[in-house]
Amino acid sequence: MTLNISEDILKVSWIEEGMIMEKIVIEGGHELSGTITIGGAKNSAVALIPAALLADGICTIKNVPNITDRDALFDIVKLLNCTIEQDGSIIKIDSRNLENKLISEKLSVKLRASYYFMGVLLGKYKHVEIYFPGGCNIGTRPIDLHLKGFKAMGAKVTKRGHKYTLNADELHGAEINLDFASVGATINIMFAAVLAKGRTIINNAAKEVEIINIIDFLNKMGAKISGAGTDTLIIDGVTKLHGAEIEVIPDRIEAGTYILIGSLLGNNLKVEGIIPEHNTALFEKLEEMGVDFKIEGNSVILNKCEHLNPVNVTTLVYPGFPTDLGQPMSVVLTQADGACTIRETIWENRIGHYPYLQKMGAKIELEGNKATIMGKAHLKGTDINATDLRGGAALILAGLIAEGTTNIFDIDYILRGYENIIHKLTNVGAKIKLEEI
Ligand code: UD1
């Protein structure tokens, strides 16, 4: 295995020996009809799996998406001597024989969410050894806010190279003010706080719906957390947690991606199994653009339309327009009748897909974190590379609307977070396949 490591940015770019290299091949221009069913939320599942290790017992997690990030977490869970039983999307994790071990760099860099074992093992054992996590290269992605929280609770942090060692004689409650409402820091601090002594208060906590899902799980395990969905979380530490059952909420980002695809290619395309309220900001923007969509219970039906109004989009923390949908949205903006802007406010480097959209014929000007996109562009298929998960999804959308054939390379990024994406799209009429390189 070869790793590209540059300072604190560990780019997940590895080639395992014997790994089959594949590309995605798309023949563009086909309308999509039928039904796409949304799976469990990646960003919930990748925290719920480590959370199960906080229990002394067996936890059941339902609706776990079949993505490679899940498998990377399973490898860490098994290293820590826990067993996993899997029946389709239902997994059972038995943590009764958990052993606290060094989590190697090879396992840590496979995904961002490996850092959740920091909070979990620190909470349970007051000691953890782990490496800087991986994840998409969309910004510097520091973990200072996570560490600030752990330190406030009494942990001592030592960093040697990319390796972090955290120790505490005792973890105690603390009042922690996050400078930014970070999703990862909120969850990680919560993981350490549920087994700490006394009360922890997290101010300016993240309010993403996935966090509510995780709090629900922890409370079912016996934790005492209040304030879910608000920016102040109060956690009263307990001495022990027990096994519990939870269902992963539907993936609002996967749903949003298919909704955006449907807005350009739908012919009565149904995206089902969604919680519409989780995508309010997206639906509001689509309405402003004049997209033809109808919400019916837990589904939305989309039809493509000839004219789309130009709009301006700014990504924000929840409940604002999600940063994870900014890149797919930028492809929709290439099809509006006029100039649109999209401003990314969460990540400083979420721009990897733009050169490839330009190569396909999109007219985009980048100025700092703002892209001005001139519609309506006629996109043509060509060879392009996924540079990150959501940028990869954006390129799939571009390939689906382009004239001719698009070949997408570096597709591992996409498979990390979209379950059965080829199958789901083929099922509704897309001409898309995996091909060995
Ligand atoms: C999570 C999501 C990701 C989403 C992001 C924002 C997961 C696995 N990933 O990522 O899909 O794009 O939320 O909705 O759930 N920051 C710091 N210091 C820290 C932590 C974060 O400066 O210690 C900054 C980051 O650099 C970034 C911003 O805060 O600019 C948001 O990061 P955060 O909310 O923590 O994102 P993740 O949890 O990594």
Image (cartoon, grey):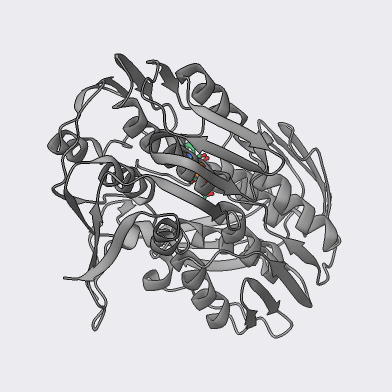
Q: In which quarter of the image is residue 372?
A: top left
Q: Position of residue 109 (x, y in %)?
A: 38, 63
Q: Is residue 246 visible?
A: yes
Residue 15 or residue 293, whichever sits in front:
293
In the rendered structure, the answer to whether residue 403 lies left or right of residue 136 reads left
In the rendered structure, the answer to whether residue 135 lies left or right of residue 85 reads left
Q: Where is residue 210 in the image (x, y as percent from the top left)?
A: 65, 47
Q: Position of residue 312 (x, y in %)?
A: 41, 16
**Eyeballing the image, is 303 above or below 432?**
above
**Eyeballing the image, is 164 above or below 391?**
below
**Eyeballing the image, is 320 above or below 3?**
above
Q: Quadrant of residue 77?
A: bottom right
Residue 231 or residue 298, whichever sits in front:
298
The residue located at (70%, 79%) in the rendering is 95
The residue located at (56%, 28%) in the rendering is 283
In what quadrant of the picture does the C terminus appear?
A: bottom left
Total numbered labels: 0
In what quadrant of the picture does the N terminus appear?
A: bottom left
The residue located at (47%, 58%) in the rendering is 158
Q: Position of residue 138 (x, y in %)?
A: 34, 42
**Eyeballing the image, is 154 above or below 145?**
below
Q: Can residue 179 be seen in this view?
A: no
In the rendered structure, the answer to whether residue 356 lies left or right of residue 240 reads left
The residue located at (36%, 24%) in the rendering is 306
